[in-house]
Amino acid sequence: MAPPRRHRRHTAPLLAAAALTALAAVIVLARGGDADADGGAAVSKTTGSVRGVVTFKGTPPERTPIDRSSDPHCAGNTAPSEDVVVTDGKLRDVLVRVANGSAGEHAAPTEPVVIHQHDCAYTPRVVGIVAGQKLQIVNGDPTFHNVRGNLGKRILFNLPQAAEAAPIERDVSGKAGDVVSLACDVHPWMHAWVAIQDHPFFAVTGADGAFELTGLAPGTYTIEAWHPTLGLQTTKVKVKKGGNGKKAAKATLTFTAPAK
Ligand SMILES: [Cu+2]
């Protein structure tokens, strides 16, 4: 049965449909670009990959509760601290990359890296970008945030973002190896980190701790794993021509509980 008719101009849905079609085309193009930049693990016979997992040894620090009652729009989020998130011995929020300066020269992708503010938390909390690539910050919350970006103690930007305000897009000034931290002064528990590379060979671990770096020229590489509170671990791997999928170089990076 047809839905009840409303008195409405017919152009709006048509325009919306056209906009969605255009958006879909842009997304498809962007994905295509990504696949090329990554070298396409399944298709390339001249490059190789590194596959691995980031583990946590020992008893992880307790995830303490966060008091978000200062803002009623945030109080519904009852998630505990995400400083160290370990699931079955696997560590989340680790940026894994080929060491900077060892993977040739690479132009920054034209599409921005996006961080959302949702339920008064940054998602994701750790991202990687290529030097020169833009960072976009979206406010999906019905409340006010400010977005302060720091490089160490130096404030790079500090911008207000009201509910339903347009996304903020910034050039993250900084060089490969820098980590720009994001914080919200309205909600002091909000933190995120933007790690800058001079190449696109990086990934951030999810709950399963897994990562895969594809499209690498054959050679020996230092692999770095960086976590915002646990620091850096490194290992070396040898990437072989056509070494993809099950033939990828294997890397395991292990963090341990910080000393008390
Ligand atoms: Cu905020």
Image: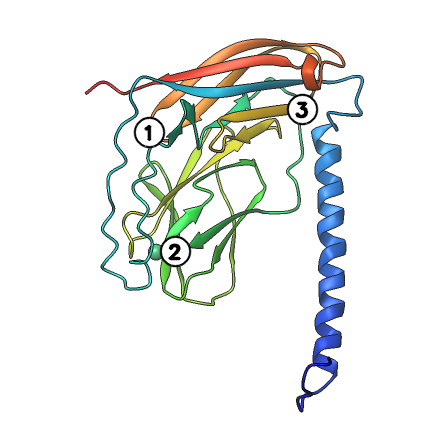
Q: Secondary structure at mark 3?
A: strand
Callout 3 amino acid = Thr
Mark 1 and mark 3 lie on one chain; the one further toward the N terminus is 3
Identify residue for label 2.
119
Residue at left offset 36%, top offset 54%: 120
Q: Decide: is 25 above or below 93.
A: below
Crowding near pointer 3: few (<14 within 10 Å), some, many (20+)?
Answer: many
In the figure, is residue 216 to the left or right of 99? Answer: right
Q: Which amino acid, mark 2?
A: Asp
Label 2 to label 3, Cα distance in Å?
33 Å
In this view of the protein, which residue sits in the foreground, 135 or 82? Answer: 82
State which tag comes first along the sequence, 2 or 3. 2
Q: Residue furthest bottom?
A: 7
Q: Quadrant of the C terminus?
A: top left
Residue sticking out furthest to the left: 260
Vertical comparison of 143 with 60: above or below: below
Q: Label 1, label 2: how many angstroms apart (C-alpha)?
A: 22 Å
Contact? badges 1 and 2 (CB < 8 Å): no
Mark 1 Cα-neighbour bin, 10 Å: few <14, some 14–19, many ≥20:
few
Q: Are marks 2 and 3 in contact (CB under 8 Å)?
A: no
> Residue 133 at what x, y percent from top left?
59, 42
Nearer to me, 222 or 53: 53
- Residue type indicated by callout 1: Thr
Mark 1 lies on residue: 229
Determine the image quadrant of residue 242: top right
Marked residue nearer the N-terminal end (1 or 2): 2
Q: What numbered label is drawn on residue 105?
A: none
Say how the picture is coloured.
rainbow
User: Which residue is disc 3 drawn over?
Assistant: 214
Which element is circle 2 on? loop
Task: Please state, as top left, top right, bottom left or bottom right, where the N terminus lies in the image.
Answer: bottom right
